Each structure stands twice: as structure tokens, then as C-alpha cells.
């Protein structure tokens, strides 16, 4: 070995030592499970980056449920505390966040917004024997991982496709154009529709992709008009959804339009203006239409100064299902709580929560809304 | 349903609109590159900032001045503020690094981009904002099956006027002459008594103002403004500038329009999921065949 | 910097060098014994970026080529391994040679016609190529489309299945040593000196009979192979890969690590990568700042570039001729 090489190697080691020293400061030791007064729940949501709004909403919703539960005497006489780690909607960051949660010694894990960040993290929770309740992320890839302690509280994409089929039959539409945004969640939804719809005798006229934030879809609109589609299903997010609706109308498309759960937001109505009238939404449980939803909205708004977001009810219910499961078995034992969640049958704000053997929701929680006179109206088929 | 010719024509119209946005932004890239050989990665974020200023000012004005006067005022405000932002980035981030290796300059630009992008993201809580003007976006003329809206025509006219104006400014005025001279030889310019720093600053102001006009027009035309809108736009405009021959003003315009048209045609015949592969594939092909871009001049380079 | 200077001084003393090295090695290798998983994971991430940065350093630092699409090189390795394991049930270790071959082939296809371009054009070509790779991975079903490949089987080493972070820590530690040795060998070889010549003055190099296009291609291939192997290991460590891990931001991040640290200098590049990976983690739990850490990172980047334009830890000889290059 040359002297220069040794020098380089030694420098490498020095640097690594430095970074260990600095990282060590950030690393937290002590676990929560040792403390018998507390039940610590790890929360994996994005609180920075492009999806911070949703992650913060989820975190607040968990916090609301936890505070309520603690005020009512806690669970088994123990108080619930949250330990949050930011996944930044990024795979690398999520694995670090997950190991941070595991290292902290939490008892359970909740969260999961971006499928792409949640999936790499889930394996670690499985390896650490932590019951993991995924509140929002609903990619079917999560089910395919086959982790027997990971439960999905949001209806997966195939429920959305089934709801869409009901709507299409109701409207008598024959030929559907799909638009997604090329990320894991919207592409997954589009792929499922692409396979489910033809099984129900409905044609897929064309599948298009609109990159996030790439304003112009006029070429896509022309392609859709040319494909002869009489129905457009937007699988993407509400940020770009209103723009797509407006440009569809502006470009002369006259058929029906529906948007998926990523766009189920009241902002869609104001942003799309007159073009939005009559647009359908295959929506996750909407808090305004849930029984008991009013108190939830009032409590949430009083506590955090703004109304709850799309996934707030799911997160709120997640925490209560966990509470009931722990109370039912009378301990925080991994296997017992896992089995209790598996057998749970809970009627919450987001609808009925009961799991299949694949740990997906048995009953779809999707509803159909339509924009009428500037607000959402429930469509019953 | 369209006939084949109608379909192609409609897609060309679509491409022209998108292309004029690319061209306006590409001009800023090209001007800055021409004068200090910097790939200004933050340029797409300046465009985004312009859109945000336009939206905010319009919102603030809405009680007093609505409709077209309000829109014009908002875009002018966006031009000014983005111009100032462009100048500040130049003055405080790029100028101190001008003597360093090229790559350090590039990294500084990425740093500036990170700062603007994340600042807007934090300010807006990463939520989109929506521009509600009350204008009828779909009013327009119909030729056969081809639709062109009035607002699209306004966009085309404004971009054409701006591009012609800029060409005249660079070609006919003393400042334009100074810009071209600095692009050739900075040291000699300094000896000839040209205030090089001032001209470089001005180049940033003009480039940023053009991007801000594009941002303002996007805000009015598309109606939604979000922190990530400059990212794709920036990369595409950068691509357009290179296709045209970076440093060349007519090249940037040509590249922008061409890229817009290619994307529209690509969307129609290959599908939108492959359109970027098509666009970037062609970019690589063009550069292999014409290593200085379509209108770029061959320059001897020293790293 | 105090510790570094002292460590450097210690290293310069021949009497203590071997001893210090040995002690450092033991300390370094002993971290998994007392550190929690989180800290190890952060360190793993730093090592991962260091591997990528070392690979890119051959292209950017040694040869002076501007590559804005390094994520594609690492995606190609990751997807080759991922597909072979998921669809064809190969053993991980057997996928490595394939990963190398695929990396070489793609590097030749993209590099051979484009490496003669000016550096800024080369930058946009590499960026375009990276976008093509990412979008193709997103569109094809064999690459798992937008969801990517998940539940990739973990490999075994010496009959031990690699599942723990501590095991991966050692695997990547060995890789780091390997990459450092390779980088160091290149730098001091005839080939490395030719690359430095090309970087400093391509025309002169050509005039002196260096086949610049060929040497650039070699450097490009070498960088691609190093990235590909890192990608292969990344795929099995993460067990899931998706197109979003290989976007332009990732390419920019790797380039930042190289430039920030001081391109061309091995410890500098590693320091840059470590800084890049660890800095955001330090701010993870700080309220308000935690959410704005990328903003501060950007600011810091600008400040570092202004105060130390050659990077945190530049190569000594690059300090001398820092002048704006101009077209003449």
C-alpha cells in the first residue's frame, strides 16, 4: 500500500469519525416501551417537502384522537404519546425515519402517506415486530408485500375502480380516457382501472400522463377528444386537477369528467369555477357527510385553527381502532394486538373498518360526489 | 372527431402556445449563458416566483382594479419584483463566484434554486394557489374542429412582441452592443470603459423579467400556481435553449417553439407517457448531428 | 477543523501512522456494537452517497466532464439487479457481473457519440438521458412501472442472510474501502494523469498525443460501472426501488456532494457526501428549521461556494489556477 493511499484512507476514517460524532448527537437513545406509564406510537408522515400539508394534517388528526383518549383516562390507565418522524415523501429519508422510530422503542406505528416512501419503511417495522397501521397510503403494492402486521385503513385502488364502474354504468358511459401523474399512487390507480374497466365491458379509449406541475395539457385534451372518449377519469391530485378540468372544457371536450380521491378537495370547486360544474368525485369518506362529522370538524378546527383535510377522518379512526384493540387484549403484546386489529369491526367517521385476510378494508369506504351549484353533493346510485 | 389535418393543426396550435412559454424562459437562460457562461438553474424558479407575485398582487388589487387592467398591473409588478430578485441572485450569489471553476458556479445556481424553491414551498405550505379572474377562458374562434381561444391569441401576440423587442434591443441599442461585447471578451470590455458588472446585472434583470412575464401569463392562462411549476418548465426551457444553440437569442426562440411543437406531436402520436422520451431523444440526436445546437456558433472552449 | 488538522498531523508522523490507522479502523468497525439502528442508518446513507460521489468523481473530478444525470447510471445497476432477482430469481451476487456489463454497454451507447460535445451540452445530454431512463422505467411493466420493484429478496453472505442494518453497514464499509482503493489507483496511474491533463487543458492533451475522446469514454464507463454496482447494492439493501429515487434531484444531489467536498480529492468527496447526507438529519427534530432544512441547505451551499469556491476540501493543485474560463 502506498503512503498516499494510507493517507487517503486515514482521511476517510477521520471524516467518518467526524460524521459519526455529529450523527451521534442527533441520534436519540432511550425507548418509550420501558416506561410503563406510556404507550408510545410512532408516526411516519411527511412534515417537510412537497407533501408536508397532508402529513401535518394527518399528524394533527392523530394528536386530536390521542388527546381525547388521554383526557378520557388513557388506555389501560396508560397515556398515549406520539413519536413523529418525517419521511419527506422520499424513500431514503423514509428508511431513516423508520429506523429512528424503531430505535426509539415505540410500541406501535401509524402513518403512511406517500406509497413510494412508505413501502421501503414497512419492512423495518415488520422486522421489529411492530403492528403498523397505514392510514392513507393505499397502493396495492403494500398488500403485495404480504406483511402480516401491516393494515391499510384507506380503501385500495381497486375499490376506487369498482366505484368508478358503478358510476359509469349509472351514466351509461362506454369509453373512458384515463389521466394519471406518473407517480406510484396515481399510476397504480390508472393501471387498476385499465384492467378492471374492460372486465366490465367498458373500453379504455386512451391513457395519458400529466407530469406534476406541468401546467399545459392542451395536447392531451386534443388526443382525448380524438380518441372518442365520452368520459374522462382524472387519477391525479387536486393541485393540477382544476387546471385539467378547465382545459378539457376549454379544448372543447363535452363528455363527463370524474376525479379520483387525490383530488377530493373543496379547493377543486373554487379553482375550477364554472368548468367544474357537474364533475364527479370518487371520494374517500368525506367528513361533511359522516355522522358525527360536525363535532370532529369543530374540535379539529378549534384545536388547530384550520379545518381537517382529506385523510383526517381515516387517521382519527386509526387511533381509535388501535385503542380498542389494546383494550380488548388488555396489553400491548405484539401478536395479541395484531390479531385484535385483524378481527376488529369498528364503525368510525370514515365508515366501517373491518379487515380482509389480506389486511385491506373489507367494505369500500368510497362515496360518489358531484359538484353542484358550487358545492359537493352526495350521489346515490 | 378530427380529420387528420385538423388533428395535426390543432396539435400545432397547442404546441405553439406551450412553445412560446418555453421560448420566453429559454431567452433568459440563453442571455445569461451568453454573457457569463452560467447555466442558471434558478431561472425556472424565477418564472415560478413571477407567477406567485402576479397571483398575490392580483388578489390584493381585486377590490380596486379587476379584469384586464388588474392583470396587466399584476404582471408588471411580477416583472419588477422578479427583476429585482434576479439582480439580487446575481449580485450576492453569482458575482462572488465568477472567478471560481465553472462547476462551482453551477452548484451556486443549484443552491439559489433550492433556496427559492423551498422558500416558496414553506410560505405556501406546499399547497397550490388558484387564480380566479372571472375571465372566460374558453371564448374563441372555431375553424372546422380547430379551436383557438382569444386568450391564446393574446399570449402569442405578447410573446412575439417581447421576442421581437428583445432582438431589437440586443441588436440596435448601446446596451445590447455592450452585452454582446462582454460575451466575447470581458477584460477588453473593461478596458474600453464598459461597466461590466452593471451590464451583467442588467442581463439578469431582463432575463428574469421575461421569465416573470411568462410566469404571469401562465398564472392567468392556467389558473393554478404551485411551488413546483418552475421545475419542469425550467428543465424544458433549458433543453430548448440548448437545442437552439445556447447563447443565441434567435436560437432560444426557435428551440422553444420547436420543443413545444415536438411535445404536442409526440403526445398525439406516441402518447404523453413517451413524449418526454421523444423530446429528449431528439435533443440528443440534434446535438450529435449539430454539436452547437441549431443556431449556435462553434466556440473554442476552455474549462 | 481542529480535529482534522490534528488527525492529519498524526497521520503525517510516520511513526504513528500505522498505529493510528489500526486504532481508527477498530473504532470504525466497532460502531455497530454500541450505536442504535437510526445512527447506523444515517451513517449507511452517508456511505451510500459517498459511493455514488466517488463514482461520479471519476467523471467530474478526474476528467472534468459535467454529468447531470448520474442517477441514471445508478438506476441501471439497481434495475438490472432488481429485475434479475424479481423476475428471474437470480442470486444477487450473480447479478453483479450482469449489472457491470449493462452499465458498460449503456455508457458506450450514450457516451461514444456525445463525449466530444462541449461540457454544457454534455450536461444537458446526460440530463436528457437520465430522464429517458427514468421515464422508461416508469412506463415498462418489467421495471414495475411507477411503483417500482418491491420486496426484492435480500442476499446472503457467508451463509448469513443480510437483513440487519449493522450487516449492511459492514458491507458498505467494505465497498467504501474498495472504491477508495480504486479511485486512488486511478488517480496515480498513467490513465489518471491523462485524465487530469484532459481536465486541465484538453487541446494541449490532444496535441501531446493523448486520445482524449477514448480516455473520456474510459472515464465515463468507469464512473458508470461504479454507479451501477452501488445501484445493485442499493436495490437489495432497500428491497424496493422506484423511478422517484432516480430523478434529477438525485443527480443534482450527487453532483453537489462531489463539488461541495472539492472535486478530485477522495477525502473531500467523501466529506461532501457525508455532509450532504448528515446535515438534513441533524435538523430533523428542530422545530420550524426542521421543515425548512432544504432551504438552509441551499443557503449554506451558496455560502460555501462563495467562501470556499473550490469546495470544503479541495485538491491542492486546483487552488492555483482559479480563473473564469472564457470563450476566446
Image (tube, helix red, strand yellow):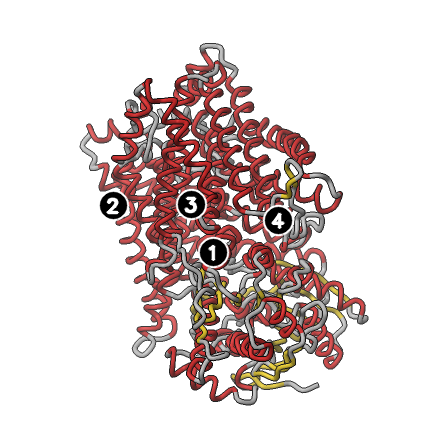
Q: How far apart are marks 2 and 3 (CA)?
A: 26 Å
User: Which label number is shown at residue A226?
Assistant: none
Q: Position of residue A122 (x, y in %)?
A: 58, 58
Q: Nearer the viewer, mark 1 or mark 4?
A: 1
From the image, tell me which residue sits under label 2: B92
Can you identify the residue that label 4 sits on?
C239
Check residue A103 in the rendering and tell me which mark sits there, or answer none. Answer: 1
Query: Closer to us: mark 1 or mark 2?
Result: 1
Query: Mark 2 — on which chain does it sit?
Result: B
SS under mark 3: helix
Protein chain holding label 1: A
Asked if B68 appears above or below C281 in the picture, the reply is below
Q: Name the residue located 63 percent from the left edge and 65 percent from the top edge.
A: A149
Can residue B151 be seen from the camera position used here? no
Q: Is residue B231 above or below residue A311?
A: above
Marks 1 and 2 close (CB-CB < 8 Å): no
Amino acid at each position: 500500500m502506498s503512503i498516499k493511499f494510507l493517507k487517503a484512507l486515514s482521511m476517510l476514517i477521520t471524516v467518518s469519525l467526524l460524521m459519526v460524532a455529529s450523527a451521534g448527537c442527533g441520534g436519540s437513545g432511550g425507548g418509550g416501551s420501558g416506561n410503563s406509564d406510556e404507550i408510545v406510537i410512532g408516526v411516519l408522515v411527511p412534515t417537510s417537502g412537497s407533501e408536508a400539508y397532508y402529513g401535518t394534517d394527518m399528524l394533527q388528526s392523530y394528536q386530536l384522537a390521542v388527546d381525547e383518549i388521554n383526557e378520557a383516562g388513557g388506555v389501560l390507565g396508560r397515556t398515549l404519546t406520539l413519536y413523529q418522524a418525517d419521511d419527506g415523501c422520499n424513500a431514503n429519508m423514509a428508511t431513516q425515519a423508520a429506523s429512528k422510530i424503531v430505535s426509539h422503542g415505540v410500541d406501535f406505528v401509524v402513518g403512511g402517506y406517500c406509497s413510494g416512501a412508505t413501502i421501503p419503511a414497512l419492512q423495518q417495522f415488520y422486522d421489529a415486530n411492530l403492528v403498523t397501521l397505514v392510514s392513507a397510503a393505499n397502493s396495492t403494492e403494500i398488500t403485495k408485500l404480504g406483511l402480516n402486521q401491516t393494515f391499510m385503513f384507506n380503501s385500495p385502488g381497486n375499490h376506487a375502480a369498482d366505484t368508478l364502474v358503478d358510476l359509469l354504468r349509472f351514466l351509461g358511459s362506454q369509453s373512458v380516457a384515463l389521466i394519471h401523474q406518473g407517480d406510484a399512487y396515481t399510476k397504480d390507480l390508472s393501471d387498476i382501472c385499465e384492467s378492471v374497466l374492460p372486465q366490465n365491458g367498458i373500453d379504455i379509449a386512451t391513457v395519458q400522463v400529466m407530469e406534476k406541475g406541468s401546467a399545459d395539457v392542451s395536447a392531451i385534451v386534443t388526443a382525448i377528444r380524438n380518441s372518442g372518449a365520452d368520459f374522462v377519469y382524472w387519477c391525479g391530485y387536486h393541485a393540477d386537477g382544476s387546471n385539467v378540468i378547465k382545459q378539457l372544457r376549454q379544448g372543447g371536450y363535452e363528455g363527463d369528467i370524474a376525479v379520483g380521491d387525490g383530488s377530493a378537495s373543496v379547493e377543486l370547486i373554487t379553482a375550477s369555477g364554472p368548468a367544474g360544474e357537474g364533475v364527479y368525485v370518487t371520494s374517500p369518506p368525506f367528513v361533511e357527510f359522516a355522522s358525527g362529522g360536525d363535532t370532529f370538524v369543530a374540535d379539529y378546527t378549534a384545536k388547530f385553527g384550520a379545518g381537517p383535510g382529506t385523510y383526517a377522518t381515516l387517521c382519527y379512526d386509526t387511533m381509535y381502532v388501535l385503542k380498542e384493540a389494546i383494550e380488548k387484549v388488555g396489553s400491548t403484546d405484539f401478536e395479541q394486538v395484531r390479531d385484535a386489529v385483524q378481527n376488529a369491526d369498528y364503525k368510525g367517521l370514515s365508515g366501517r373498518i373491518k379487515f380482509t385476510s389480506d389486511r385491506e378494508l373489507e367494505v369500500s369506504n368510497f362515496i360518489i360526489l358531484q359538484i353542484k351549484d358550487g358545492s359537493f353533493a352526495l350521489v346515490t346510485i | 372527431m378530427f380529420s387528420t389535418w385538423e388533428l395535426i393543426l390543432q396539435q400545432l396550435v397547442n404546441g405553439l402556445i406551450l412553445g412560446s412559454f418555453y421560448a420566453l424562459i429559454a431567452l433568459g437562460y440563453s442571455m445569461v449563458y451568453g454573457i457569463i457562461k452560467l447555466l442558471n438553474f434558478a431561472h425556472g424558479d424565477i418564472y415560478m416566483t413571477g407567477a406567485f407575485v402576479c397571483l398575490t398582487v392580483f388578489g390584493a388589487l381585486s377590490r380596486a382594479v379587476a379584469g384586464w387592467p388588474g392583470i396587466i398591473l399584476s404582471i408588471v409588478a411580477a416583472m419588477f419584483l422578479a427583476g429585482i430578485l434576479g439582480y439580487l441572485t446575481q449580485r450576492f450569489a453569482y458575482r462572488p463566484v465568477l472567478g471560481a471553476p465553472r462547476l462551482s458556479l453551477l452548484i451556486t445556481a443549484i443552491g439559489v434554486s433550492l433556496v427559492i424553491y423551498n422558500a416558496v414551498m414553506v410560505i405556501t405550505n406546499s399547497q397550490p394557489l388558484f387564480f380566479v379572474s372571472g375571465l372566460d377562458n374558453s371564448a374563441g374562434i372555431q375553424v372546422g374542429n380547430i379551436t383557438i381561444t382569444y386568450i391564446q391569441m393574446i399570449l402569442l401576440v405578447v410573446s412575439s412582441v417581447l421576442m421581437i423587442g428583445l432582438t431589437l434591443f440586443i441588436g440596435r441599442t448601446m446596451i445590447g452592443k455592450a452585452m454582446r461585447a462582454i460575451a466575447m471578451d470581458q477584460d477588453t470590455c473593461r478596458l474600453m470603459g464598459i461597466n461590466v458588472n452593471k451590464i451583467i446585472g442588467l442581463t439578469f434583470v431582463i432575463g428574469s423579467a421575461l421569465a416573470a412575464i411568462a410566469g404571469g401569463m401562465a398564472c392567468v392562462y392556467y389558473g393554478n400556481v404551485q411551488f413546483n411549476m418552475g421545475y419542469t418548465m425550467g428543465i424544458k426551457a433549458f433543453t430548448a435553449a440548448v437545442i437552439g444553440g445556447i447563447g443565441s437569442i434567435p436560437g432560444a426562440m426557435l428551440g422553444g417553439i420547436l420543443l413545444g411543437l415536438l411535445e404536442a406531436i409526440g403526445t398525439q402520436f406516441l402518447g404523453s407517457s413517451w413524449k418526454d422520451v421523444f423530446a429528449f431523444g431528439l435533443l440528443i440526436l440534434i446535438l450529435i448531428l449539430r454539436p452547437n445546437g441549431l443556431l449556435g456558433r462553434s466556440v473554442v472552449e476552455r474549462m | 477543523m481542529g480535529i482534522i488538522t490534528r488527525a492529519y498531523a498524526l497521520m503525517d508522523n510516520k511513526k504513528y501512522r500505522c498505529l493510528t490507522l489500526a486504532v481508527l479502523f477498530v473504532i470504525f468497525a466497532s460502531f455497530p456494537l454500541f450505536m442504535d439502528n437510526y445512527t447506523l442508518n444515517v451513517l449507511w446513507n452517508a456511505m451510500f452517497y459517498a459511493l455514488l460521489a466517488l463514482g461520479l468523481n471519476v467523471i467530474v473530478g478526474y476528467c472534468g466532464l459535467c454529468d447531470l444525470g448520474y442517477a441514471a447510471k445508478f438506476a441501471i445497476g439497481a434495475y438490472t439487479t432488481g429485475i434479475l432477482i424479481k423476475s428471474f430469481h437470480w442470486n444477487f451476487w450473480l447479478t453483479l457481473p450482469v449489472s457491470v456489463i449493462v452499465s458498460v454497454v449503456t455508457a458506450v451507447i450514450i457516451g461514444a457519440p456525445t463525449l466530444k460535445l462541449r461540457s454544457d451540452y454534455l450536461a444537458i445530454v446526460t440530463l436528457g438521458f437520465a430522464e429517458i431512463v427514468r421515464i422508461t422505467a416508469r412506463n415498462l411493466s418489467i421495471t414495475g412501472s411507477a411503483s417500482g420493484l418491491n420486496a426484492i429478496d435480500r442476499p446472503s453472505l457467508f451463509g448469513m442472510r443480510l437483513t440487519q442494518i449493522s450487516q449492511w453497514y459492514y458491507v458498505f464499509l467494505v465497498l467504501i474501502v474498495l472504491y477508495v482503493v480504486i479511485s486512488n489507483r486511478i488517480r496515480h496511474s498513467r490513465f489518471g494523469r491523462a485524465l487530469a491533463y484532459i481536465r486541465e487543458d484538453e487541446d494541449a492533451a490532444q496535441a501531446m498525443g493523448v486520445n482524449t475522446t477514448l480516455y473520456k469514454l474510459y472515464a465515463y464507463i468507469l464512473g458508470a460501472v461504479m454507479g451501477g454496482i452501488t445501484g445493485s447494492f442499493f436495490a437489495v439493501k432497500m428491497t424496493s426501488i422506484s423511478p422517484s429515487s432516480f430523478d434529477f434531484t438525485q443527480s443534482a444531489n450527487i453532483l453537489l456532494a462531489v463539488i461541495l467536498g472539492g472535486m478530485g480529492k477522495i477525502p473531500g468527496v467523501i466529506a461532501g457526501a457525508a455532509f450532504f447526507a448528515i446535515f438534513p438529519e441533524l435538523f430533523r427534530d428542530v422545530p420550524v428549521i426542521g421543515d425548512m432544512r432544504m432551504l438552509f441547505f441551499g443557503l449554506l451551499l451558496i455560502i460555501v461556494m462563495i467562501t470556499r469556491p473550490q469546495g470544503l476540501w479541495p485538491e491542492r493543485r486546483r487552488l492555483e489556477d482559479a480563473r473564469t474560463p472564457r470563450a476566446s
